[in-house]
Image (cartoon, rainbow, N blue to C red):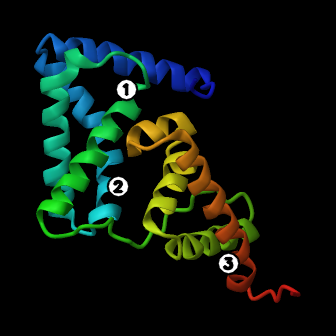
Amino acid sequence: MTAPISLLQQQREDGDRRLLVKVAARDREAFRELYIIYHRRLARFLVRLTRRYELAEEIINDTLWVVWRKAADFRGDSRVSTWIMGIAYRRALKTLRSRGNQALVTVPIENEPLVAPDELGEAEMGEWILLAMQQLPAEQRLAVEFAYGYGHSCEEIALIMDCPVNTVKTRLFHAREKLRAALPGLAGVEVPP
């Protein structure tokens, strides 16, 4: 069961599904459109994961090549974005392992707030959150990014990360606890024992 999505998200999903059907029929223009839609999102995610733009580009191309070849195999059990992000995640892990990295890279978060600052104080809070996120283990940080940065449900994150839903929930729980503990220190607030 996936989380409910907004009308705008549903419209995007419907558009993505229509494009994927056309890609399955080998429509190059539809593939170009899908590439444009997903390139930036994949680049942002993969540069964070690999720390190298050229490697991220290679993984994006590998990912979208898989999408081109396997579009007809998409069963519709998840959103198209979940399916594509899962392919990218697995391609990245495979690439990192083949190059000697056995574990996920812990990368610094870009200076993009995960929350939209409405007031000056919220902008500062966004900076503290980014600093605290850098202290999380990679798998917890990725779960948080997938959930709050990309809007994926726990079930979708489990598909992307190829792990049980309860593992995702546990990673999110521990990440939130670590963030809750780290934020006061980053804000210069002393928390009584």
Q: Residue at x 53, y 49 (%)?
A: 167
Marks 2 and 3: CB-CB under 8 Å? no
| Amino acid marked by disc 1 | Val
- Taking depth in this image into account, of 174 and 110 the one nearest to the observer is 174
Q: Is residue 166 above or below residue 191?
A: above
Label 1 neighbour load within 10 Å: few <14, some 14-19, many 20+: many
Label 3 neighbour load within 10 Å: few <14, some 14-19, many 20+: some
Q: Which residue is mark 1?
A: 80
Q: Is residue 69 above or below residue 129?
A: above
Q: Please identify the quadrant where the N terminus is shown.
A: top right
x and y, in percent, of residue 60 in the image: 20, 46
Identify the disc placed on residue 44.
2
Q: Quadrant of residue 144?
A: bottom right
Mark 2 or mark 3: name the one nearer the start of the chain.
2
Q: CA distance from mark 1 to mark 3?
A: 35 Å
| Amino acid marked by disc 2 | Arg
Marks 1 and 2: CB-CB under 8 Å? no
Q: Please identify the quadrant where the C terminus is shown.
A: bottom right
x and y, in percent, of residue 148 in the image: 58, 49
Mark 1 or mark 2: name the one nearer the start of the chain.
2
Label 2 neighbour load within 10 Å: few <14, some 14-19, many 20+: some
Q: Which residue is mark 3?
A: 182
Q: Residue at x 84, y 85 (%)?
A: 191
Q: Secondary structure at mark 3?
A: helix
| Amino acid marked by disc 3 | Ala
